[in-house]
Image (cartoon, helix red, strand yellow):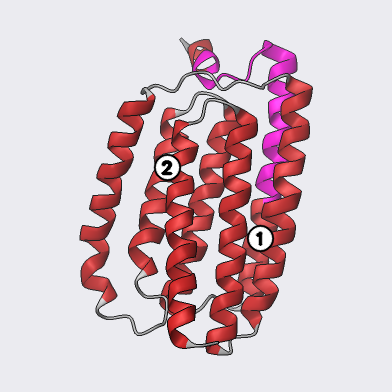
Amino acid sequence: MDAAISGNLIDLCVVAMLLLSMLAMTTTRIAQLLNAFAVQSLFLAFLAFVIADSTGHTELFIMGGITFAVKVIGIPWAMRNTAMRLHAGREIDSTMGIPGSLLVSATLIIVAYLVTEPLMATVDTIARNCLAMSMSVILIGLFMMVTRRKAMAEAVGLLIMENGLFLGVMSISYGMPLVVEMGIFFDVLMVAVIVGIFALRINKAFDSIDTSVLRRLKE
């Protein structure tokens, strides 16, 4: 693939991933949140294919395929089924409103650029400019985990962080060894399964999966 075309596709994918992270911060519905995560994962899988084709790192074709199967199809499907069983169609308001969340997210993006700018000069890969974007996605995912009140939304924040981590690894070194990445995917899949099981158990015991309600139990 031509280098210019590859560069444009890489930029398109990482910008889309960042915008979808911002979109996830604005939604109040679990279904929309899962859709944003699935589409973000789709761009991540496509990015892996582009980098693999441009650099000859064929193991990224495998990781892109696994990303598509697990994060675009598997995890969103499982979490949607769990949300339907819990009747958790609407996400409870976060501890910060949508305008405040967007403002903080924009601030985190600026912080990510300031932190990663010295590092980008030391990296010599086709996707080195993605490093700042990856740090931004990680910070926004962490912010979602901190501010959202439902367990499933917090789990999606963790999954978005993992997408940002995978993006960062591809930016620096075109991915980790295949065995390590397979282990990470297995861990992520197990996290989604465990969150679903615990959400069902917690809802059955306390008639709520609002973590702010659960925190009050220790008071």
- Mark 2 = which residue? 22
Left-right relation of 64 to 84: left
The amino acid type found where label 1 is placed reads Phe
The majority secondary structure of the magenta stretch comes to helix
Q: Residue at x 48, y 55 (%)?
A: 17
- Asked whether 82 or 196 is in front, the reply is 82
Q: Earlier in the sequence, mark 2 or mark 1?
A: 2
Left-right relation of 119 to 71: left
- Asked whether 57 or 187 is in front, the reply is 57
Disc number lying in front (2 or 1): 2
Range of residues picked out in magenta: 189-214
Residue 206 located within the stretch drawn in magenta:
yes
Q: Residue at x 50, y 88 (%)?
A: 2
Residue 173 located within the stretch drawn in magenta:
no
- Mark 1 = which residue? 185
Residue 25: which quarter of the image? top left
The amino acid type found where label 2 is placed reads Met
Left-right relation of 36 to 77: left
